[in-house]
Every structure is written in C-alpha cells, then in structure tokens.
Amino acid sequence: MNKVIEKIKKDKVINLIQEHAKKHAPQANIYLVGGVFRDFYLDKENFDKDVVVDKTDAEKFAQTLAKSLDATFIVLDEENKIYRIVLKDKINCIDIASLIGNTIEDDLKRRDLTINSIAINVKTLEVVDFTAGLNDLKAKKIRHISEQNFIDDPLRLLRAFRFQAMLGFELDEDLIKIIRKHAPKISLSAVERVNYELLKLFSGDYSEQALIKMDQTGFLKEILPVSEDLKQVPPNLHHHLNLFEHSIEIVKQIQKIYKNSNVEVRQHLDAVDFGAASRLAHLKLAGFLHDIGKPDTWTIEEDTGKHRFIKHDDVGSKMAAAILKSSKFSKKQIDYLTKMIKYHIYPSHVVSSPEINDKIYMRFIRKMQNEAIDVIVLAMADRFSARGVEITKEVIEKNINSLQSLLDFYLNAKDTIKPLPKLLSGEEIMELLDITPSKKLGEIIKLLHEAQLSSDITTKEDAITFVKHVGHGI
C-alpha cells in the first residue's frame, strides 16, 4: 500500500489533477479509480487516469482542467457525463466522470472486476477498497463484483479475458460460470467496442492463455466463430498440433520472439500505426487468423497421405477481409491484417530459393515495404509452432537462421531504399500499345511493377521495351 501511495505522490499527471482540484473544486471529492492502483501495485506504467468527481460538475471540471493543461477536451458520453482529456504528449489521457450513486462505494459496486475497483481520494490519498480488490491483486485472481453488472454491459465478459491477457491472472470459478452462462450476450455489444477490447487482449503478454480460457468457456466462438472451423484439421506430418492449437501457439511464439528481439524490432512492433493498438497486437491477431483458409482448401493425397492446403494463404486473406469488414475494422487495419495472412509463407519461400542473393532479398523488401519485419516475425512464429514428424530440429534451426539473415538484411538496408520510380504512366502505356483502359492495361502495369521489384527494369527505356514485348503477348 505504501509503495502505491509513494508512486501516486510522484506521478506528474496526478499532481496536476490534485493541484487543479484544490484550486477549482475545493468542496468536491475527487477519486482516482480503475487501473491506477492496480498498475502501480504491479509496478506497471499507467498513462490512462480514470477520475470520478463528486459534488462538482464533471464537464466543467474536465473543461477547466483541459484548459489549464493546454490539453484536448473530448466528450465521450454526454448522457452519462463522461469526458476525456488528451495531454499534449498524446500518450497520457484522463477520463473524468460523475459519481454514480450517493457514495464512492455505490459507484464501485457498479464496476466489473474487483482489481479495477480500488479508489483513491486525490486530496487525502485515502484508499477505498470496498470490494477487497487488493486481496485479489495479491492472489493474482480476476473476480467479479456482481453478475448483474455483466448482464447490464456484456462487454465486461470480454474485459475479464482482456485483463487475464494483460496480467496472467487466473479467472475465479464463479466468474467462469457467469461467462459460460451469458457468453451469447456479447452479440449485444457494439462491434467497435468488441474490437477495441479484442485488440487490448492481443496486446497482453499472456494472450494465448486468455484465448485458451475463452475457448474453454465457449466465449471465443461467440466473437470469432471461425475458430471452430480450425478444430476440424488434425495434426499431420508437418504439425504436431491441430490447427486450432497451432493458431494459439503462434500467438504465444510471436510474443516470445518480440521479447527476445533487438530494440529496433521491438520499437517497430510497439508503434501504433493503425487502430488504437500496437502493430504487435495486430500481428498476434493476424497470427491467430493466418490459417483460416486451411479448412476450405484441405485435401489428403491418396497415395502418400499428405495433407495439402493449396492457396490457403490467399483464401484465408479473402476470408479475413470479409470477417474484419463485417466487424467494422478500419481499412488500414484490414489492409495490414490481410497482408500478413496472404504473405505469411512468403519469407520462408524467399529464404529457401535455390539461389539466394541480394536481388532476391531486395525484391522481398520492396514488396513488403514497412511490413517486412512483421511478416518475417510471423514466419518465424509459424516455424516454431509447427514441429511435425517430418520437421526435425535441424529443419527448424535452418529455417529460423535463414529468416534471421533476411531480417538482418532488411534492417541494414532499409534506410538506403528509395521508393520505386514511376517509369511509365497508364496513359503512356496506352499510347505505346494503342489500347484503351482495360483489364489488359491493368495486367501490364502489374507486370511492369513486378519487374521493377526484381530490379529487372530500372530505366524508362527498359520499361518501354518491356511494355512493348509483354503487350503483344497478352
């Protein structure tokens, strides 16, 4: 407890809230709630401060605080009087809400989990632990406060798994019963809210544990029905796990590779380039979905008994696009996730080429661009997750070492790579071949781009010769 209080005293954002409360709301009770106590107790950083105000107007308090901090004021929920302040660093934010009920105890009773229901009076630093959340933090237990709270907001069912993924805690048996009972109710939650929590889950160090428990409780199939199809494909000569277990394992391996990577790779995967979560979170989601095309492409050779999944990467990418679009992921998110699924085998194909050289590596880099690191990590995780009878230790080591060489090549070369120049426009190609806008034109443009990727075409003169040659053959 003393450790937490000392961290609160030293936190710059909390100090700013304290100073503002004393000056502009001396009569009010201002409480830190939610994750602040939990994160400080667990020695984790906290950039999201949740504040509950009593005996003062939440909107006015939030507006004046935003003004004093030169921060951005956002209305999150006008009806329930919830407001957000985003500080200038774009990292820290403060959510401010009115007290629900007559006392802080009434407010805490309405929350989801005990570990998120410890409040701290900003002015007095008094800790209010009405639900015994501190005991659950010590026991590493995720426990609910009220079943009715999950009925009122079924998204809290998913939040339980999100915190398991973040903390590695065990779910209380009574909470598991509640989740099993009410799992179908998650369909009542807005898909945008589900997506946000799902990506938070994939942001956690223990994502695979949460996914296993989600499956055991029947909850996973409610938000990702495609997961049930993965269970149809059994282990084979290249896979020691069935396809569902393999998809879980790859999530674990991506996290492990990330932890063991150098600073440059970790910084790349930490970046928040699309959505409200890191590349790492999106990559782990892509990892879980990377083989969803296999059940529909599964065949077994009669003479050898080998399992084949021809073009499962392409089929899976298209399936994922439909799933993600219906779930209202953004275009940038869909583009990234489907790209990872479509090309998850590509790095291994590159490093197993009969003749490996810089030209082949450079083609890979130009094709993958800023996703080169991501797809190499995905390929590594896929290799570590498949250890069938025909996959010896030597096979794995050779593949991983080759992929590491490809990654090292990219890291050394990336700052010197310039964008491919546009050697010929569509209009110029049409004039050269005397054609109109058509499917043929699109195919020629694509072939020219592929030739540039391979560095076979580097000048406009080369491009003109190339276009004239291929144009007559299409």
Image: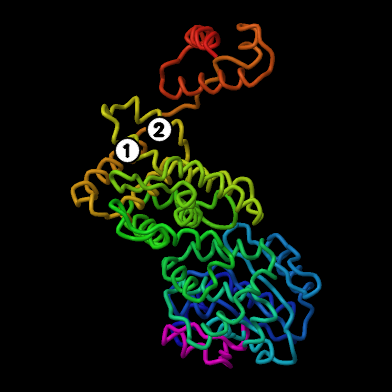
Relative depth, front residue between 444 and 127:
444
In the rendered image, the quadrant that contains the C terminus is top right
Instruction: Provide residue 372's location: percent of width, then percent of height.
Output: 42, 40
Instruction: Provide residue 471's location: percent of width, then percent of height.
Output: 55, 11
Asked if residue 306 lies left or right of residue 180, the reply is left
Asked if residue 356 lies left or right of residue 436, the reply is left
| Residue found 41% across the figure and 57% down from its top | 233
Contact (Cβ within 8 Å) of mark 2 with mark 1: yes
Residue bearing the label numbered 2: 364
First in residue order: circle 2 vs circle 1? 2
Residue 402 in the image: above or below residue 461: below
Instruction: Provide residue 377's location: percent of width, then percent of height.
Output: 38, 48
Residue bearing the label numbered 1: 406
Q: Is any part of residue 167 visible from this angle? A: yes
Q: How crowded is mark 1: few (under 14 residues within 10 Å), some or many (20 or more)?
A: many
Which region of the structure is painted magenta? 122-146
> The disc labelled 2 sits on which kind of residue?
Phe
Relative depth, front residue between 141 and 416:
141
Relative depth, front residue between 425 and 176:
176
Residue 306 in the image: above or below residue 277: above
| Residue found 63% across the figure and 61% down from its top | 87
